Image (cartoon, grey):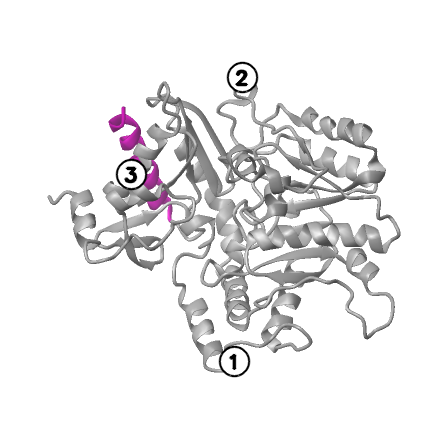
Amino acid sequence: MQDPIASNQDAAANLNLAPLWMPFTHNRLFKQHPRMVVQADGMYYTTADGRQLLDGLSGLWCSNAGHRHPKIVEAVKAQLDRLDFAPPFQTGHDKGFELAAALTSATGHGFEHVFFTNSGSEAVDTALKIALAYHKTRGDAGRFRFIGRARGYHGVGFGGISVGGMVANRKAFASALIPGVDHLPHTHDLSQMAFSRGQPTWGGHLAEELERLVQLHDASTIAAVIVEPMQGSAGVLVPPLGYLERLREICTRHGILLIFDEVITGFGRIGPMFSADRFGVVPDIITFAKGITSGVIPLGGALVQKGIYDTFMTGPDHLVEFFHGYTYSGHPLACAAGLAALEVYRSEDLFGRSAALAPVLEAAIHSLRGEPHVIDIRNCGMAAAVELESRPGAVSQRAMDIFHYCFDHGAMVRYTGEIIVLGPALTISETQITQLVELLRQALKAVP
C-alpha cells in the first residue's frame, strides 16, 4: 500500500504553496507535509491522491447538510443565472427579504428581524454595535461595557477578540482591544465534571460571577453579555445545568442585553435550530453563520428581538437608523443558498435527525474512556470532544499527531490545543459514527 503522506505530497508537487498565507495554520510545517483535498460529496472529502476521508467536523462546523447538497448547489446555480450581485445600500433583492422572512419565522421567540453579514466574526461585531447603539438610542449611552467569558471564541474581528477569551488571540493583539471589557470564568473543571454526558450537573453556580461583575462595574455601564451556549472552539465546553438560565435572569434584572453566539451551535448542531429550543433560554440577540448555507457560500448575521429593532425605527424616515453594513450583506448567491439550506433542513428533518443521532454519538465517544492519554470526554448534540494528557513540554503535539494519523487513515477530525473535536454533518449514519470513533480509538492506541 502506498504511503498516504508521500502520495499526497506527490499530488501537491506541481502546486506553488509558498504564496498562500494560510489561516490558523502552522504554515512552515504544512508546506513541508501538505495535506490536500480536491473534492467533497456528502460525508466525504477526496484527497489530492484519490483517497476518501470521512468528514468528522462538517468542514469547519459548517456543512451541516453534508457537502454539495444538490438542492443547495442548484439554487446557487439558478441564482447566478439571474442576479449575481445587488448593492445592499438603498436597494434590495427578493432573495434577501425571502431569507430574512424564512429565518425569523423558523426561529420564533420574538426574533423578527435579521441583519446579514458575511461571517461569524462580522456577525459578532455587528451584534456588539447593535447593543451599544440600542442603549444610546434609548438615552442610556453610559452603557459601554461588554462582558465575555474565558476561553470564549467570537471570531477574529477586534470586537470579537476583545470579548473573546482565547489567550493566544488576545495576547497577539492586546494593544488594540476594546477597552472596558471584562470576562466571566469558563465553566470547565475536570475535578468536578470529567466524563460528563451532556450537561454537567456541577457548575451552574458559576453564573453568579456575573452578579459580582455587575456590582464591580455597576450595571449602568454594562451594555451586553456575550457567550456561546456551548463553547465549540474551546473544545465542546457544555453549559452546566442552570447556568444559562441564571445568566438570563441576571441580565434581565439589570437591563443588560444577552447575546448568544450561535455560529457553531446554530442550525441543528445541538438538535434544534438554535439554543432557545434546546436549553429553554431566550437571548436578546443571536449571531449565526456557518450552517445557514451549509457552508456552500459565506453568510452570517445577527437576529434581534422585535423591541430592539423598533427602538432604532424613530426619527425622520429619510435618515439612516444604524450606521453599519457590508458591501456583501445579504449577497444574492448566499441568500439563495440559505433559502435552499433551510428547506433541506426542513424537508429532510435534519434537526430531528440530529436529536436522534446525538445519543449514538454520545455512546460511541464515551466508549473511548480508558484509552491511552484520555483525561476527559464531553458531548452536546452532534458535537463531541476528547481531551488528552499533554506530553511534557509539548502541549498540543499529541493532538496534532492524532489529527495527522486520522487524515492519513481515512477521516478528517479537528484538534484545538490538546483536544480532539468531532462535529459531523447531520446526515451522518450510525455506521459512519462508529467508523469515525473506531478510527479515533486506533489513533489513540497508535500515537504515543
Q: Which residue is mark 1?
A: 83
Q: Which residue is mark 3?
A: 404
Query: Could you tell me residue 144's position as x and y percent?
Result: 77, 44
Q: Is residue 75 magenta?
A: no
Query: Could you tell me residue 156's position as x and y percent?
Result: 54, 47
- Local SS, label 2: helix
Quadrant where the N terminus is found in the figure:
top left
For the record, the magenta segment spans 429-448
Q: Which of marks 1 and 3 precedes in the sequence?
A: 1
Q: Which of marks 3 and 2 precedes in the sequence?
A: 2
Q: Which of marks 1 and 2 precedes in the sequence?
A: 1
Q: Is residue 442 magenta?
A: yes
- Local SS, label 1: loop
Q: Which residue is mark 2?
A: 191
Q: Looking at the image, which residue is at 51% across and 54% down? A: 290
Quadrant where the C terminus is found in the figure:
top left
Task: Using the numbered discs, state the Cα–Cα distance from disc 2 to disc 1 in whole angstroms.
Answer: 56 Å
**Amino acid type of disc 1?**
Leu
